Image (tube, rainbow, N blue to C red):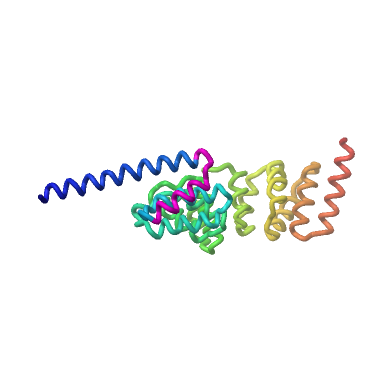
Amino acid sequence: MRKTVLVGILLSFFCILVSCSNNHHFLDRLLEGGAYQEVIDRTTSQFQRNKDPELLIYRARALDRLGQSSKALDVIKLYAALTPLSKQEHQELSIELALKNQDWAYLVSQAEILKERNRLTIDYAKEYYRALLKTGRTQEAKTLFSEAIRGTLSPFEEAKLLIASEVDPAALETYLGMLSIEEQVNLVLEVVPLGLDPSIAEAWFISLKMQKSDTIELYRALALLAGRAGRRYEEAQYARLYQKNKEAHE
């Protein structure tokens, strides 16, 4: 009798696993086909019946692809709350959603899991680094940069990362010094239009102005930096030099 009951339980458990697996494959196909609303509808009704946390991952992906990243992040947090830490996966998705919503603390928590599991790629390490700075954990950010990021990028990309992270201008100076004038100019033209911290712009303007070069693009870069630093006189001065030299070469 006991043996029969045990066999019945095992068969039921096996059927549940097979059913869940088939359902997940079906949801994968719906996502691939762009049927995002159908995924949301199906996962809602199915989750109410069986409380399978994995359904929340599909729901989060569908919401995100519909442009509802804030709701998607709430769903992924619910998944984390319902799933034991040892069984939690999908940290990459969690980081991407946290980044879209600028939830730096949650991004850090998910990146820490990847780091503990030796799954922290350089791309996620960069976002982890930025999030640590955003949450005021500067020393941890410096350690992460030294251990996981430094040396994996070109000096140009390292400087670009530091600028995007709005680090202390003094910390940035070393990396800018490793770049040629042309590389610095290219970096200015790339990052300033996207927004640049005024203190970084100020330090960079002073440093770049001292370079012995009179190229047209340098004048343009100096005008942009001066503008971000609030130096209106120098901004106008270098803008005129840029325009004058540009016209002379046309």
Question: For the point 44% across and 50% down, which residue is it?
Answer: 43
Dominant secondary structure of the magenta stretch? Answer: helix
Quarter of the picture containing the C terminus is top right
Outermost top residue: 250
In-image side of 195 versus 10 (left or right): right
Residue 185 placement: quadrant: top right
Counting from the top left corner in percent of width and height, residue 162 is at 60, 52
- The magenta stretch is 32-48
Question: For the point 55% across and 47% down, which residue is it?
Answer: 65
User: Would you say residue 150 is visible in this rendering?
Assistant: no
Residue 201 placement: quadrant: bottom right
Given residues 63 and 170, the one toward you in this image is 63
Given residues 199 and 112, the one toward you in this image is 112
Question: For the point 26% across and 44% down, which residue is it?
Answer: 14
Given residues 118 and 103, the one toward you in this image is 103
* Magenta-span inclusion, residue 188: no
